[in-house]
Image (cartoon, grey):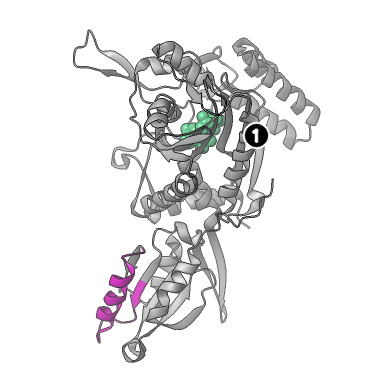
Amino acid sequence: MASQEDIFKKVVSHCKEYGFIFQSSEIYDGLSAIYDYGQNGVELKNNIKNYWWKAMVQFNENIVGIDSAIFMHPKIWKASGHVDSFNDPMIDNKDSKKRYRADDLIENKIAQYENKGKTDKAKKLTDDLTKCLQESDLEGMYNLIVEHEIACPFSGTRNWTKVRQFNLMFGTQMGSDVEEAETIYLRPETAQGIFVNFLNVQKTGRMKIPFGIAQIGKAFRNEIIARQFIFRMREFEQMEMQFFVRPGEEMKWFEHWKNERLKWHLAMGLGESKYRFHVHEKLAHYANAAEDIQFEFPFGFKEMEGIHSRTNFDLNQHQQFSGKKLQYFDPELNQNYVPYVVETSVGLDRTFLAVMCASYKEEEIVNGDKTDVRVVLALPAFLAPVKVAILPLMKKDGLPEKARQIMDSLKQEYSCAYDEKDAIGKRYRRNDAIGTPFCITVDHQTLEDNTVTIRYRDSMQQERIPIDAIENIVREKLKVGVKEVKLVV
Ligand code: ATP
């Protein structure tokens, strides 16, 4: 059986081979941790975005969306705490010149202890690391690296620099006058664009608390180590929702959104056992509760979404730094207050990666005395880049024309692909590899009785159906059970 590492490598090369993801600037040897989405990738990504937008904005009367700018006033990042504390502890190996996140090196050591059954050592080191992180004790982290004889994976030496803080925000200059140019930042999260628009939306939308503002957009972080493909990128996309509530009610809403968000993930059908909650040991400066939804990637359980109770920290800070009131008048309480906020923040690219990893399958097919491997991307049907492939059996006798007619009627509703090249078996396989749930084959019988063959990707079963029935079958199978999902926490 292929190891998880092998499977991950296969997923990465499949993404490239079938036009899902390309390394950015590839012909110039690439740009580290930056990726481009190809012709199939962009469709899948848009479908995930739509699924999120529908579940958050369309299904909830009290949530509306915005699209705020990437550049914002530099004071915003001072107010939010990102200028002073959006840091990761970094350390360099003087021999290999490689840079690491100090906490990552220590966590790898903990995993090594665990793998060797040294649970006491692992526990002690976990406690020590947690203490250092809580107290931002850089020297303490350096001492742990020395004490536990952690070596650089490249040079194998322990010739380390001190641990330093590294700010993850990308800065650039705005304005043409060099002297007066101001440093502004590419946003490291989309949330602040929501906070600074809180009153604009509340007033113009006549929103009543509790209500939410949702946004999908790019975020940028100068990650020290960027690896595991699109799991950790320097330019990525977030789907965030800030839910504004009465002070004191935040824990109720925190539980509510934890459950709702888990349901959203489960409804994709990637497998219940692949998800778990992880409680944050170290709370960010703004939070009074925080949990992650983790997904089991081939490289282990890792964060996919954060659910944070952010108190009234952000709105308070923006009141203070802007000098403008950001309060809500609650008619039921007859009182003004700064609302509390519960945030749900999910990585679009990480969701994409989870979908790809869980869907990639290699199946052995026995055909007489021959065995063959079928690569199939068993994507949730509603997320597939192409929903229906229309395949005339031959390129003659009017079959292409008939196939085009079917395609024209279906493409108003569904993304379709027309393919007449190569043997039918090869065309089925090509569609399996990009996750197309339905293939429609048009043959000579179609011309006689208006029936076609529909082939289902997962079972490979084929059925003869009237052309008129295609749309109903496709519509039925593309339904997503957001509401039907049974909640398992
Ligand atoms: P991590 O601990 O993995 O660095 P984080 O806790 O800093 O993530 P948040 O600030 O909570 O992440 O961001 C919310 C979501 O944005 C994450 O759950 C993740 O899905 C996504 N995300 C964060 N950083 C990256 C990145 N560098 N590349 C891709 N997605 C990211």
Residue 437 x %, y %: 46, 66
Q: Residue furthest right?
A: 120
Camera-nearest residue between 46 and 487: 487
Residue drawn at x 33%, y 92% is 448
- State whether residue 392 is above or below residue 154: below
Q: Residue furthest left?
A: 176
Q: Which residues are magenta?
A: 390-414
188 relative to 30, above or below: above
Q: Which residue is mark 1?
A: 252
Q: Is residue 395 magenta?
A: yes
In the image, is residue 154 part of the stretch drawn in magenta?
A: no
Name the amino acid type tagged 1. Answer: Lys
Q: How many numbered discs sit on the rendered protein?
A: 1
Q: Is residue 88 visible?
A: no
Q: Secondary structure at mark 1?
A: helix
The image position of residue 122, as x and y in percent, is: 74, 28
Q: Residue at x 33, y 38 (%)?
A: 29
Q: Residue 55: image x %, image y %?
A: 49, 48
Q: Is residue 255 left or right of residue 419?
A: right
The crowd level at tag 1 (other Cα within 10 Å; few <14, some 14-19, many 20+) is few
- In the rendered image, the quadrant that contains the C terminus is top right
